[in-house]
Amino acid sequence: MKPVRASDAYHNSQLICTYSGYKPANMHKWGPGVRDVYALHFIISGKGTLETRNQRFSLKAADSFMIFPQTEIYYYPDPEDPWEYIWIEFKGDEAGRLVGMTEMERDNPVAGASPHDLKPYFPAAPRADARPFERIRAGAQLRLLLSYYLEFYPRESQPADYVKMAKEYIIINYWRANLTVSDIVNAVSLERSYLFRLFKEAAGMSVSRYLTAYRIERARELLESSVLSVKSVAYSVGYKDQLYFSKVFKKATSYTPSEYMTLHGRTEIL
């Protein structure tokens, strides 16, 4: 089975397969690196290891693991018994909510041996020239696959889980200039005032303030180490208006973006 990639025309769909494939038993490894989509892997046979920044997981046949967007990972086969696996990448506004309903999370992205063979349920991502019915069918098959993970590996919902889901949505979508608090509320599927209360209790700040704080933190990282201009940094963290970005940044850090760059030994590229 050769990997196939879906058309960019469907990037804004609620749930879309973007890439899928099969890897026979060999010494192929991936990373360390970061992806911008979810990637669900099911191990057919053999063994391998998944490493995140803080943990290492030993995996075997019938185990699954999830790659989360914007999370550094590294995975590789066992030298004596290399794994064989199948995978599906996906994205969309609904992706985080569905994954958040399973026990897999950034700090523990694995699921133990499945009680059933899940390989037949992994869909092939539609090709770039796929017809509408093929895209709809692929999306339906992906939902069917995820429904089994919700059945076999359910998360017991706690108030903190809703806050985690909201933060997860922000981490994935903070760069979108049109991202609103309503988008975050809808992604979590919780009554607005209830989410606001849970979030304030858990994070010590409002949802909108957390979004701004996360954007500024990402901007600081880019200003410290990247070669991007202030305008490009602003755009990269969700601000179309450079002047407004500079105002928000200075309020949060007491420095303008240009001053912050100079403070870290960088000169703005105009």
Image (cartoon, rainbow, N blue to C red):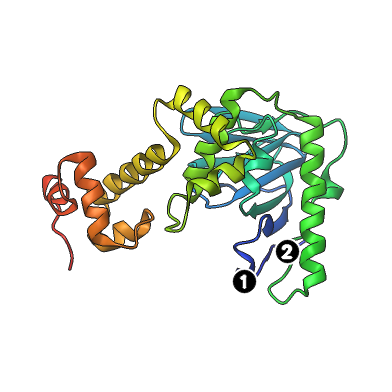
Query: Which residue carries the number 1 mark?
Result: 9
Mark 1 crowd level (few <14, some 14–19, many ≥20, 10 Å Cα):
few
For label 1, the SS is helix
Residue drawn 48% across and 50% down? Answer: 180
Residue 26 in percent (x, y) is at 68, 48
Q: Quadrant of the C terminus?
A: bottom left
The amino acid type found where label 2 is placed reads Lys
Q: Nearer the viewer, residue 10 or 56?
A: 10
Mark 2 crowd level (few <14, some 14–19, many ≥20, 10 Å Cα):
few
Q: Nearer the viewer, residue 49 or 128?
A: 128
Comparing labels 1 and 2, the label whose residue is closer to the camera: 1
Residue 218 in percent (x, y) is at 34, 45
In which quarter of the view is residue 43 placed? top right
Looking at the picture, does residue 8 appear above or below residue 86? Answer: below
Residue drawn 42% across and 54% down? Answer: 175
Residue 103 in percent (x, y) is at 68, 29
Q: Would residue 176 appear left or right of 42 to someone viewing this image? A: left
Q: Earlier in the sequence, mark 1 or mark 2?
A: 2
Whether residue 130 can be seen here: yes
For label 2, the SS is loop
Whether residue 32 can be seen here: no
Looking at the picture, does residue 54 appear above or below residue 42? Answer: above
